[in-house]
Structure formats: structure tokens, C-alpha cells
Image (cartoon, grey):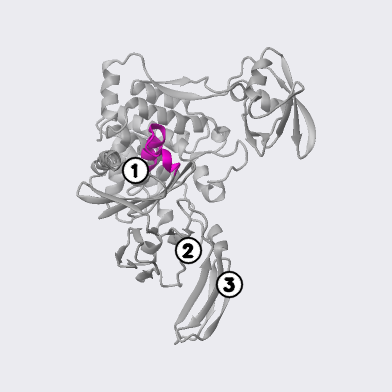
Amino acid sequence: MGPYVENVVDVRAETRSGKPLAVHKSAYNHWVVEASGSESAVLHYRYHAVAPDAGASYFDAHQVYVNGVNLFMVRPGAIGEPCEVLLDLPDSFQIACGMSQSGKRLFARDFHELVDCPFIASPTLQHHAFQVCGVTHHLWFQGVVKPDWGRIEHDFKRFGEAQVTLFGGFPVTEYHYLFQIHFKPFYHGVEHANSTVLAFGPGLKLMQPDLYVELLGLCSHELFHTWNVKAIRPADMVPYDYDRPNYSRLHYVTEGVTTYYGDLMLLKSGVWTLEEFLDVFNSSVLAKHYANNGRNHISLEEASFDSWLNGYKPGVPNRKISFYTKGALAAFILDYRIRKSTGNKRSLDTVIRSMYEEFGTGKGYTRQDYKRIAEHHAGEDLSDYFLDVIEGKGPLEEQLGEAAKYFGLELMQSRAGGNAEMRFGFVAEEQDRSVLVKQVHEGSPAARAGLVVGDELVSLQGLRVNAGNLEALLSHFKDEPSIQVNIFRADRLEQVELVKDSGYVTPKMVLLPANKLDEAQLKNRIAWMQVG
């Protein structure tokens, strides 16, 4: 459905004896084959597969990469029938897939399994397997890369074992990491029942410290989805309807909780130190949350419901939030609330384990179920949390500060960043040799001056702006009460005035370890860093 349908072309049908059958579209994603009840129809079509990201499909001379949910068709009423895929491939090709297979044939128990088991077929696949709590985990790398198998296995085992311990069991009999390695920077992952596809790059730098930290975070996040999303599913996504958007107000659980735990499990398992965890939390969660001015206008429930509308698009400036990042902050606050009320005897760990025990067999959960289980483990009414954090649109600094203090951390204002964003409240980037305004923070001098997203910066105080000198120019004129800025807007030259405001600082928050911990804070931190 959605944009993938536009990739389907040249649809035709015939009987098994080769007699052509008429085909016509009845909807944007439905085709009708005109055949008598006694005839078997064979459907042929081509698919334009040119996107090697984690959710699309891609074919070239080196590989066949299929995400079935965007490529395979299903006959109405046949969604529960067994499926078989025969691949016409050279003998040199390996097949990386979570479906059962025999030679070049793949077998699925029904259409749901077929489209939830992507595969890569290629003669250049690199493969490595290891055991996690008795379950075989496969690593499949496609692309230009030299993995350090020993280090990867060591770290993946540690966070994998921690996650299995957290939930009390693994929901599938084997697991596959399917890596599409890019030559340039890339970061995208999609979860599936017993596998995940991870588009990542640049492959030549995979094992360098900064990039390897990103890889670990992405893989831990997607593995956590094996429980939270694939086994534990919102009721409005059960069963999944491939014909329409599956709206849900619960993505602060599906993605927010997973974002929190994807990184936290690397801390709990000892793969990351506390400092490494905080570095990632600050850059990937807090920084992104505070860079988004929609945080004071859109609730988590609203953002979840609108995910089909603008979840992965820029959206209206200052009127959108990420349920990944704000959802992770909400999870951190809930974890703290439960730990505080129970003296660390219970936590969000025990909540999600109970969710798995009650809903891990395919029964969908509701918002009321999540609240009920959270309150059971907290031993108190959490209505204020759901009203303020989940339904509310207000700032989270008070709740985050309390949570930080409980774990011996401090929530602090960061002044990191350049003059454009920190002093004047706008972000600019070079595009096609032009310097364009990418973001304008609410209440900032830039907003008061009338700068808007898309403006092309031409000059400051009569001096030409380019990507390399913007910060230097702003610094040079830092003592001026105002700065005249020429811009192009809709190809018309305009002038705005940036007025200096010594009281303005673009909000940016970070979590840092407190200088001194008392005995209670140390105990709380130790409990938080353990699987329990």
C-alpha cells in the first residue's frame, strides 16, 4: 500500500495454459482479474526496486533484496494460506532470510509471515552465527565492509542475553540481522518477527568507535522490537490491515519505550559505560527533543496517531514532535516513578515483562491495559503521569530533573552550539551552494525578525554569506545591537533585522553525572543499571 504501489507496473494475467485474461484496477492498490470460477490465473507484474534502505526493495547484478510487504500481492480471502517463493538465482547466491527454505525455495505458513520475512540473495553475503541463550542468531552483511566478527559477537551476545533475561524468554526460534551496508553515511532499521533489516554506513568505517556505537544502538533497538511490537502489539494493529493505515495512539510505547531500552540495555549489559550511555542519550534523545519546537504544541498521543500523516516527513515547522525521542523521555520518567514508589523493587522492566506475559501471544493491548499494568507495579495512581506526560503538551523539565536526581544525575542547560542557533535561534545549512534556513526556534530573535524555514541567506551587514563564514560573521558582529540580513524568499530579495537579545538562549538540556552521590542515589543508580 502507500507509495510502494506506484512501483508496480506491467500487470497482466493469463490462464495456466497461457490464455490472456483481462485485468483492471478497482482501487489504487487492487487489481481485478476477469476469470471464470474454474480457471486458475497466473499474475505477472514488474516492480521498480531501486531503494536499498531498510524498508524497501532493491535489485541489481549483485543482489536481490526483497521486503515482501511492499512487493507481494495477496488474493482476498487467501491471507491465511501457505505461501511459497521460488527464486531463479545462480547457484553462487546465498539466501539470508528468516523463512524456512529448501534450496532456492522459501516457505511461509501464511501471507503475514511471507511479508514479515525480508530476504537478501547475493553471492557476496558475509555470514556469521552465534548462540544467545540457546537461540541461533545470524549476522548477514551485504556490501563493502570488513566486520570484526569477534567483537561484534561478544557485544551482541551481551545485550542479547540481557534482553532475554529481562523478558524471561525469546519469542522466536532463531534470529537474523540483515545488514545493507552503504558506502556513504546511512542509518535506518526496520523490525520483523524473527529478523531485522539494518541499512547502515559508511561500511569502510563500521568498526571505528563513533560509528560502531551507532551500530550497537540501532541493533539493540531493533532486537528489542522482537518483543515490543512484534510480540506485544497495540490492539489497533491486531490483525494488521494491509489495505489501510493502521492508526494507533500508542507509539510512545512501541517506539518510545523501545528507544529508551535499546540504549539502556547496552548499559545494563555492560557493553556501554554510564558515560557512553549518557553521551548517546544526550545526543540522540535530549538534543533532538529540544531541537523540536513542536514539543510544546503536540502531545505524544497526537504524534502517534499522526504518524501515518507526517511521521517521517518534516511536517509543519514547530508543530511536530518525535514519539521516538519524547517517548523515550516519557519511558525514563515512568521508570523513575515506579522505582521511587517501590524502592526499586519494581520498575519499567517489570512492566514490560508483564506486558509480554499477558499480551505476547497475539492479544492486542490498549492504553488502559498499559496504564493498568504500570499502576499495578507502581502501587499507585499514575493518572497525573498520563495526563501531563502522555496527553499533555507542557515542558518535561521538572519531571526529568526529578528522575535525574533520583539516579544521581543532573539535568542541566547546555550552551553547546553556534551563534546562529544559541544566540539568535535559527539553524542554517548549505544546499546547492545556497545557505538556507532549516529551522527557526519559537520566541527567538530570528523568529521575531521574521525569518522562516526556506529563506536563503544572502548577506549580513552587507557581507556575503556562505556555508563557511556564517558563524564567523555572527561572531564578528556580536556586539552590534542589530544585524541587517538580506534574504531571498520566493526569489524576491527581502531584508530583515536580527535584534540582539542578551536574555535569549536556545534551550538545550543534557544529563550529566552529579558531582557527589549520596548513598540512596548510588543504590538507585546501581538498581537502574541492572536487569531486573
Say which amino acid is labelled 1: Pro
Please give the range of residues in magenta: 201-220
Amino acid at dot 3 = Ser
Q: Which residue is mark 3?
A: 26
Q: In the image, what residue occupies the spot 78% across and 28% down?
A: 495
Residues tagged 1 and 3 counted as in contact (Cβ below 8 A): no
| Residue found 77% across the figure and 22% down from its top | 462
- Magenta highlight: main SS: helix
- First in residue order: circle 1 vs circle 3: 3
Residue on which disc 2 sits:
71
Q: Earlier in the sequence, mark 2 or mark 3?
A: 3
- Indicate which label's residue lies in the foreground, 1 or 3: 1
Q: Note whether residue 207 is visible.
A: yes
Furthest-left residue in view? 134
Q: Position of residue 255 (x, y in %)?
A: 42, 43
> What secondary structure is marked by label 2?
helix
- List the residue tagged with mark 1: 147
